Image (tube, helix red, strand yellow):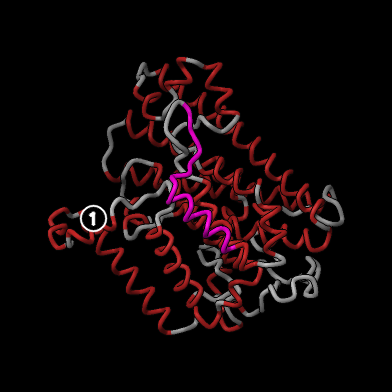
Amino acid sequence: MASVAQVNDASLGRPAQHDEATPKQAKPKSRSSAGERELRLDLFRGIALWLIFIDHLPTNILTWFTIRNYGFSDATEIFIFISGYTAAFVYGRAMHDRGFVVASARILKRVWQIYVAHVFLFTIYLAEIAYVATRFDNPLYAEEMGILDFLKQPDVTIVQALILKFRPVNMDVLPLYIVLMIFLPPILWLMQRKADVALALSVALYAFTWQYDLTLPAYPGGVWFFNPFAWQLLFVFGAWCALGGAKRMASVLSSPATLWISIAYLLFAFAVTLTWHIPQLSHFMPRALEQWMYPINKTDLDVLRFAHFLALAAITVRFLHKDWPGLKSVWLRPLILCGQHSLEIFCIGVFLAFAGHFVLAEIAGGAWMHFGISMAGILVMSAAAWLLAWYKRVADKSGSRGKVADEDADVAGGEL
């Protein structure tokens, strides 16, 4: 969310690395001369991972601290936007320095890594659910997690899973990310030459999707929970911001009018969501407004959700500067480490979410039991992130990585 970065010197302490007007003359800084990481990207991606994990658990105390209860968007928008931003930043630099073919090869290598991680997670997740359902003689687990079709037709279902059409509950984000990354090379190629044209084409595809109900089919029925034809807008917008768009929006984002419009919209969204939790307040909602606004479609990235994310991002960038001392705080270190290893932590979070769901279903507990399960999951994710960071440092010191590190958008975090 905070990665609508590079707004102006006052908020970031540095200019943007790319400018649409001179995409080939302005060479990005190299790693050696780059300076420090953009920790805000790591921080908010870590926040998104924690929020996704908490939202996947049954309702508990911590659930009321997630943003989906106070507005139209949730952690998914944060995650996809930052993914687009960091992917464009890292692979855009590779395309500038080494050409389209080499950069595309690196992107496809990353796609393969994410795909393998998805298949591995699918296998472990499936085994976890099937074991619990069989061990405790409770088929409702299989039904609730959406794996009944696998138990009935495992051969067909596995094939459908390998082509990303079959996915158990809570496993929709990685397939979306895979599809978006596959189309990143042509997006970057066009964006480095005509960034505004690339964004305009993305908007056109989004509008076309809504107009003609463009979707991808799922197995055994229905469509993808996150429609790539719609969610690509957020991904491409993140890439556009990374490659100079945010710099050109500096005057708009620093305007007092933008601030007050964003605040007003967030208050409006909060008032609407309040009626979802307190039905008595729904009487104050004008019927015409309800008819126009509902349903707020998450599958196709409703424009109200997109606008809510933009409002949050605009306010965050305005007040959270790159040099904020809190980014170096030990209290935020677990979040930042999780954000720096987002693929691994996301997979761990999905696994832990079902484990927590199982514990809460089998062991009757009140609010504090729910809170304890949530905190235990967060601690495990943080410990795993620390271990991954430690291993990376050891590997770097041992010289196992080459002189030039082959960065990827998952761990780069917008590093300069």
* Tag 1 residue: 291
Asked if residue 138 lies left or right of residue 309, the reply is left
Q: Is residue 376 left or right of residue 287?
A: right
Compared with 143, 329 (above or below) is below
The residue lying at 35 percent from left, 47 percent from top is 371
Q: Which residues are magenta?
A: 199-219
Query: In the rendering, at what x and y percent does residue 106 appear?
Result: 76, 49
Q: Quadrant of the C terminus?
A: bottom right
Q: Is residue 200 magenta?
A: yes
- 1, above or below 57, in the image: below
Left or right: 365 in relation to 145: left
The answer to which quarter of the image holds residue 263 is bottom left
Label 1 Cα crowd, 10 Å radius (few <14 / some 14-19 / many 20+): few
The quarter of the displayed image where residue 409 is located: bottom right
Percent x, y for residue 226?
Answer: 47, 44
Name the quadrant containing residue 189. bottom right
Q: Position of residue 393 (x, y in %)?
A: 73, 53
* Amino acid at dot 1: Gln
* Dominant secondary-structure state across the stretch colored magenta: helix
Q: Is residue 214 magenta?
A: yes
Could you tell me if residue 335 is visible in this image? no
- Do we see residue 246 in this rendering? yes
Q: Total of numbered circles in the picture?
A: 1
Circle 1 SS class: helix
- As drawn, 197 above or below 377: below
The one nearer the camera, 327 or 312, is 312
x and y, in percent, of residue 33 in the image: 79, 72
Task: Tell me what residue is drawn at x 66 percent, y 78 percent.
Answer: 15
Which of 227/52 is in front? 227
Q: Residue furthest front?
A: 212
